[in-house]
Image (spheres, rainbow, N blue to C red):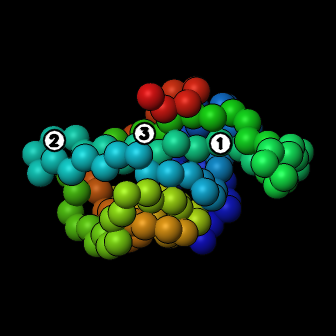
Amino acid sequence: MNDAAPPSVPGADQVVSWFGHWPSFHDAEVIRLDLNRRGVSRLVLHAWLMTDKTYEADGQQYFVREKHAVVTFELKDISDLELSDFSQQNVLACLDVMGDSSGVHIQLYPSYGIGGRIDAGQVTVSVTPGMPE
């Protein structure tokens, strides 16, 4: 798993601008995955920043989450993928984006639900501040 600098994909600077750094996507939820054999496929996540602040509710302590956003990866020319364990809820432990001469590789490390990898010829990413609908 990689906590390094943002990937060199178009739009990564918007994600860094919103969150203040490239996030690991720990605990992010996959809210949609659209696979299109001809055209643009989309991986849509609900992500946020976890703070060290806490609050109490129902007799339990919870961490305060800030900077909620919907992060969308648009993928073109998917050449290979391997996905498993799609569920009612799909929470990531981490997401890595790596590039090489063959394209861009997105690795989904599962916490609960979906995991796997998607290899695409082109990837762009965008961020929409706020909670998902």
Q: Nearer the viewer, residue 103 or 70?
A: 70
- CB within 8 Å, label 3 to label 1: no
User: Which label number is shown at residue 72?
Assistant: 3
Per the image, the residue denoted by label 1 is 48
Q: Position of 119 compared to 38: left or right?
A: right
Q: Is residue 96 visible?
A: no
Q: Secondary structure at mark 3?
A: strand
Q: Secondary structure at mark 2?
A: loop
Q: Position of residue 12 (x, y in %)?
A: 54, 40
Amino acid under disc 3: Thr
How many neighbours does mark 2 have within 10 angstroms: few (below 14), some (14-19), or many (20 or more)?
few
Q: Position of residue 117 (x, y in %)?
A: 37, 68
Q: Depth-wise, is mark 3 or mark 1 nearer the camera? A: 1
Q: Report the residue at 65% width, 42% height from top.
A: 48
Q: Position of 58 compared to 42: left or right?
A: right
Mark 3 vs 2, N-terminal side: 2
User: Which label number is shown at residue 39?
Assistant: 2
Q: Report the residue at 27% width, 54% height from top.
A: 121
